[in-house]
Amino acid sequence: QVQLVESGGGLVQAGGSLRLSCAASGRTFSGYVMGWFRRPPGKEREFVGAISRFGSNTVYADSVKGRFTISRDNAKNTLYLQMNSLKPEDTSVYYCAADVQAGVLTPRPNQYDYWGQGTQVTVSS
């Protein structure tokens, strides 16, 4: 079993920055691929990005590429999402997710086995 807890959400003005964290427990954190997803108001859940087990590879959705950065600290069992140049359309509940099969980096939500409860990010114009 893997427990994931996101933190760091809040209200920020357009152009600002936030860093989300996802604390993991229950299994060896370095054993799995991690992803970030978001659910904008009234919309479907969408992929934000993913990172390989040791952080050497990352992939991002086109909508966040160049503005968001995913990183991880396996010694602290923590995943991060640094969000810069935030836009009102980034307003969402953000979720971290773990793929314990440690397969390829994927944007498909059904490939991820465990999810956090989410943290709200609101970007004002």
Image (cartoon, grey):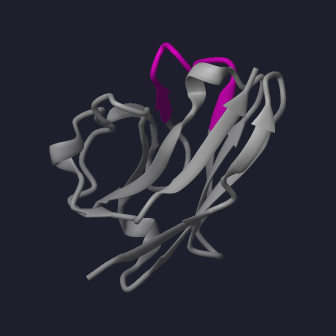
Instruction: Count the marks.
Output: 0
- Judged from this view, the residue extending furthest toward the top is 62
Q: Please, is residue 28 above or below residue 119 in the view?
A: below
Q: Nearer the viewer, residue 122 or 77?
A: 122
Magenta segment includes 50 = no
Position in image of residue 109 (x %, y %):
23, 42
Residue drawn 72% across and 26% down? 86
Q: Please, is residue 5 above or below residue 71 in the view?
A: below
Highlighted range, magenta: 58-69
- Residue 53 quadrant: bottom left
Quadrant including the N terminus: bottom left
Q: Nearer the viewer, residue 113 or 73?
A: 113
Q: Nearer the viewer, residue 86 or 28?
A: 86
Q: Please, is residue 72 above or below residue 65 in the view?
A: below
Residue drawn 55% across and 48% down? 55
Task: Give left or right: position of 117 versus 86.
Answer: left
Quadrant including the C terminus: top right
Residue drawn 21% across and 61% down? 113
Task: Give left or right: position of 42 versus 58.
Answer: left
Position in image of residue 69 (x %, y %):
65, 35
Residue drawn 58% across and 68% down? 74
Position in image of residue 102 (x %, y %):
28, 55
Task: Give left or right: position of 116 versus 73.
Answer: left
Position in image of residue 10 (x %, y %):
70, 51
